[in-house]
Amino acid sequence: MSQKRSIFEEVGAEKREAAAAPQGGMIDARPKGARAALWIWLFVLFALVVAMISLGGATRLSDAGLSITEWKPVTGALPPMSQEAWVSEFQKYQEIPQFKLQNPDMTLQQFEGIYWWEWSHRQLGRVIGLVWALGFAGFALARRIPPGWSKRFWLLGLLGGAQGAIGWWMVSSGLGGEMVAVAPYRLAVHLGLGFAILGFIAWYALLLGRPEAQLLQARRLSEPKLFGMATGVLHLSFLQVLLGALVAGTRAGRGYTDWPWMGGQFLPPDPFSIAPLWRNFFENQALVQFDHRMIGYLVVIFGAVVALLGRRSAHAATRAAFGFMGAWLFLQVVLGIATLMHGAPLALGLAHQLAAVVAWVLILRARFLARYPLVQSIRGSK
């Protein structure tokens, strides 16, 4: 026979149970476990993707992207292990237009130099896929993935797999005909997807960086207009990334190295010399560089306007985030001009691309804080 409990005991028990219950949903049930572990996993993926984008830029600028003429996702992980294997790989490279039309005097030793760039790029892609698969499987088996997040993590895996296939689709464009490099269109798709993947990872990491209860509270204080304008900067900067890929793919960055003019005038000579007309926007070196310059100016001007609006936010962290965003966009334009005027050497080209990654992340962070501001008390504590 159960004993009766007084109403005071029941109320006390309910209070103790409520105090013991985790706040903010299942993902916060283990504050030092699920959320922290998932954040670390995403941070590792983020760092690897940044390295992948940088290594891809080095591979492109060193003309190494076509040095491996086959796509072997599994067996290709092993590089040539003997002299005979190196000779075999070099013979395959000698059959493509890049060797015949651009590098007919290349030696085996020189080939090995560009081969390692492309092999490292592909190998890092395999590492990223492995880190994603092991992490996702581990969290799933341990039942540490909260409701609604599995789809997000699956999206990262699917985009990563698509990126590998698009990478080969890009490389294959330079293996036949009279192509001595990959098709600029495909390079733009490849780089654009890389930035999109990085953006998703960064956004998810920002969400995991704060408890769900805090995010729900912050959402009530969001600044929709500022969020919308930051989204505009994000989209415009993404267009600039795609144009940058076209500049790299057509080697337009080395065509006109004077600034602020192009060939001594505002509009470059013969900007519409290719027929049909639309192809000039993708293949004409002069027009491609001109478009990249103009959109770059537009990004920094629009970014400055949005940064000034962000400085009016009631939240200190939001003001700082938009200030950093505006300042970095200005520095990126200055670096782009310096890269152009020096003929896009390897070091400056890589610095310009890495700075674009930093700008991308700073825009995302400012946008995130416009949606989920960090609320501070009068004493300054969060």
Image (cartoon, rainbow, N blue to C red):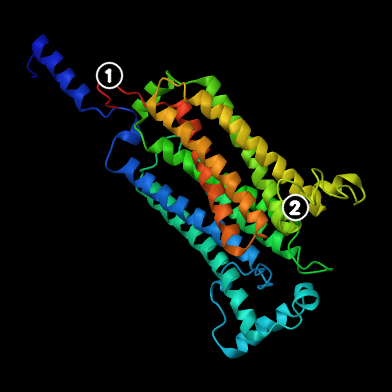
Gap in angstroms between the C-alphas marked 1 and 2: 53 Å
**Which residue: 79% across, 43% down?**
266
Give the camera-side residue of 79 and 239. Answer: 239
Give the crowd class for mark 2: few <14, some 14-19, many >=20 residues within 10 Å: some
* Amino acid at the residue labelled 2: Tyr
Name the residue carrying label 2: 185
- Does residue 77 appear left or right of residue 108 in this picture? left
| Res 60 → quadrant | bottom right
Classify mark 1: helix, strand or loop: loop
**Which residue: 60% across, 69% down?**
118
* Amino acid at the residue labelled 1: Ile
Residue extending furthest toward the right: 275
Classify mark 2: helix, strand or loop: helix
**Which residue: 58% across, 50% down?**
335
Looking at the image, residue 142 lies above or below residue 113: above
- Does residue 48 appear left or right of residue 234 in this picture? left
Name the residue carrying label 1: 378
